[in-house]
């Protein structure tokens, strides 16, 4: 799990409660007062603590039988490699495009399923890319790496707290389905949740043959 914030906290609680065998948490931040509105693993007493350590304490209290691995650094192109290679499912709960693209590239290279969530203000998205399948789109098929995007973060723009809870829980749901081989994953679809109108819809996402990430890999397969 990349990011132990608004999305990662609820997702981690459900994964730990479900008894996943091994949970790797990567986050470089410390707990801040402004996090507590949505980052439900942390308490007032955790302010100033290293997030992944406070997360492990809360998760261990819930389920001590899960093996927790803590990565207290920002995930980049290099550090993401071994983490993705040794994981069965990757959850992207990060808050910036550089991390999202680095995680996506590693998942495409190692063909690992990626469950990506995003939430901003009253809008949220959930995506699953089951990169074990050759026809699966990747994150860059939807959001090309060279696209001009305006980087806005929850810490700046704000986010409706229960919305991060909903998307984080859905990320855990899709991850557990992928691990257990249960049902049909959201792979190939983008789920959009508009909290203001309570509108939930999914749109199909196709693999982009000219995608710089998975298209290039496809060519050498
Ligand atoms: Zn792609």
Image (cartoon, rainbow, N blue to C red):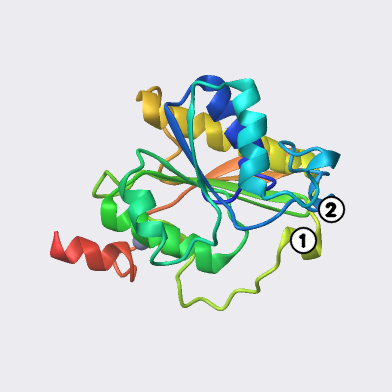
Q: Which residue is painted at 49% across and 21% down in the image?
A: 65
- The image's mark for residue 103 is none
Q: Rounded to the nearest whole Å, what is the CA distance between mark 1 and mark 2?
A: 8 Å
Q: Is residue 1 visible?
A: no
> Which comes before the other along the chain, label 1 or label 2?
2
Mark 1 residue CB less than 8 A from any atom of ligand 1: no
Residue closest to the far left: 221
| Residue denoted by label 2 | 34
Q: Secondary structure at mark 1?
A: helix
Q: Is residue 51 visible?
A: yes
Quarter containing ligand 1? bottom left
Count of all numbered marks drawn on residues in the image: 2
Bin the neighbour count of mark 2 within 10 Å (Cα to Cα): few under 14, some 14-19, many 20 and up: few
The relative height of residue 29 versus residue 42 in the rendered view (above or below) is below
Residue 162: image quadrant is top right
- Residue 105, position in %: x, y? 37, 62
Q: Which residue is painted at 36% across and 42% down in the image?
A: 87
Q: Which residue is painted at 27% across and 65% down in the image?
A: 215
| Circles 1 and 2: CB atoms closer than 8 Å | yes
Horizontally, is 180 left or right of 72 in the view? left
Horizontally, is 93 left or right of 213 in the view? right
- Residue 128, position in %: x, y? 45, 44
- Residue 167, position in %: x, y? 64, 40
Q: Which residue is painted at 38% across and 66% down in the image?
A: 78
The relative height of residue 165 versus residue 118 in the rendered view (above or below) is above
Bin the neighbour count of mark 1 within 10 Å (Cα to Cα): few under 14, some 14-19, many 20 and up: few
| Residue denoted by label 1 | 155
- Residue 100, position in %: x, y? 50, 60
Horizontally, is 145 left or right of 57 in the view? left
* Camera-nearest residue between 155 and 62: 62
């Amino acid at each position: 799990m990349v990011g132990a914030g608004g999305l990662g906290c609820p997702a981690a609680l459900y994964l730990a409660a479900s008894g996943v065998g091994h949970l790797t948490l990567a986050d470089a931040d410390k707990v801040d007062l402004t996090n507590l509105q949505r980052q439900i693993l942390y308490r007032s007493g955790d302010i100033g603590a290293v997030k992944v350590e406070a997360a492990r304490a809360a998760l261990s209290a819930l389920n001590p039988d899960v093996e927790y691995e803590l990565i207290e650094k920002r995930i980049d192109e290099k550090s993401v490699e071994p983490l993705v290679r040794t994981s069965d499912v990757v959850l992207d709960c990060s808050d910036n495009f550089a991390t999202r693209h680095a995680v996506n590239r590693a998942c495409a290279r190692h063909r690992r399923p990626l469950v990506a969530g995003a939430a901003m203000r009253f809008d949220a998205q959930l995506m699953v890319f089951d990169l074990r399948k050759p026809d699966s789109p990747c994150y860059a098929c939807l959001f090309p790496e060279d696209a001009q995007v305006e980087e806005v973060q929850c810490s700046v723009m704000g986010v409706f707290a229960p919305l991060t809870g909903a998307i984080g829980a859905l990320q855990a749901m899709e991850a557990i389905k992928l691990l257990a081989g249960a049902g049909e994953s959201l792979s190939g679809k983008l789920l959009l949740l508009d909290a203001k109108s309570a509108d939930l819809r999914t749109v199909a996402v196709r693999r982009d043959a000219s995608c710089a990430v998975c298209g290039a890999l496809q060519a050498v397969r």
